[in-house]
Amino acid sequence: MITSASSTSSRTPFGKSSVRAAVRLGRLVNQLETGILHSRVLAAVPFKYRQIGFQSLKVMFVIAAASVAILLAIGMIAVWVITALPDPVDEEEPGIHEVSHPQHQIKYPELYDDNGTLR
């Protein structure tokens, strides 16, 4: 099986290694399929059923890999959305010693005189 790669992906070292890994994986799957289909252990099973069984295993593997990829993509989008949300407003009331807090004068009016300065 010959796999053609685009010229842009093979320009980078990562692209080259990705193409090599994909080709090796394809060859490995073909060897595995040939070994399973012509196995002596499974000789009692008709050849057509062995083909259908192996194809269904390949489809289940592709579906599992795709579902993991989709879940990772959804997780990355969720993290991106959470980081893009604004920080919640600090609604804590000021303590008695937090004089610089804007709500301090409203919460503790007994500490302030008529002009708004601390006593």
Image: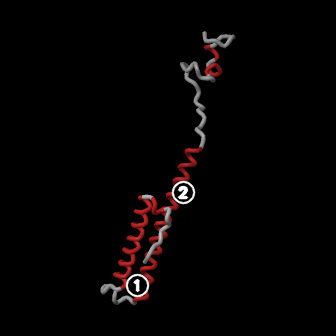
Q: Nearer the viewer, residue 49 or 33?
A: 33
Q: Are the residues at dot 1 and dot 2 in contact (C-beta closer than 8 Å)?
A: no
Question: Mark 1 highlights which residue?
Answer: 50
Quadrant of the rendering where the C terminus is positioned: top right
Residue lying at 55% horizontally and 49% vertically, measured from the top left: 80
Q: Secondary structure at mark 1?
A: helix
- How does the figure colour the protein chain or chains? secondary structure
Q: Nearer the viewer, residue 111 or 8?
A: 8
Q: Amino acid at mark 1?
A: Arg
Which label was assigned to residue 74? 2
Q: Nearer the viewer, residue 32 or 116?
A: 32
Q: Nearer the viewer, residue 93 or 83?
A: 83
Residue 20 in picture, x, y percent from top left: 40, 67
Sequence-earlier tag: 1 or 2:
1
**Residue 51 vertical position relative to residue 8 in the rendered view, above or below:** below
The image shows a total of numbered marks equal to 2
Q: Amino acid at mark 2?
A: Ile
Q: Secondary structure at mark 2?
A: helix
**Label 2 crowd bin: few (<14), some (14–19), many (20+), radius 10 Å:** few
Residue 33 in picture, x, y percent from top left: 38, 80
Q: Along the horizontal axis of the image, is 31 left or right of 66?
A: left
Quadrant of the rendering where the N terminus is positioned: bottom left
Residue 46 in picture, x, y percent from top left: 39, 90
**Residue 87 vertical position relative to residue 44 in the rendered view, above or below:** above
Residue lying at 41% horizontally and 71% vertically, measured from the top left: 23
Q: Splitting the image into 4 quarters, where does residue 17 fall?
A: bottom left
Residue 50 in picture, x, y percent from top left: 40, 84
Q: CA distance from mark 1 to mark 2?
A: 36 Å
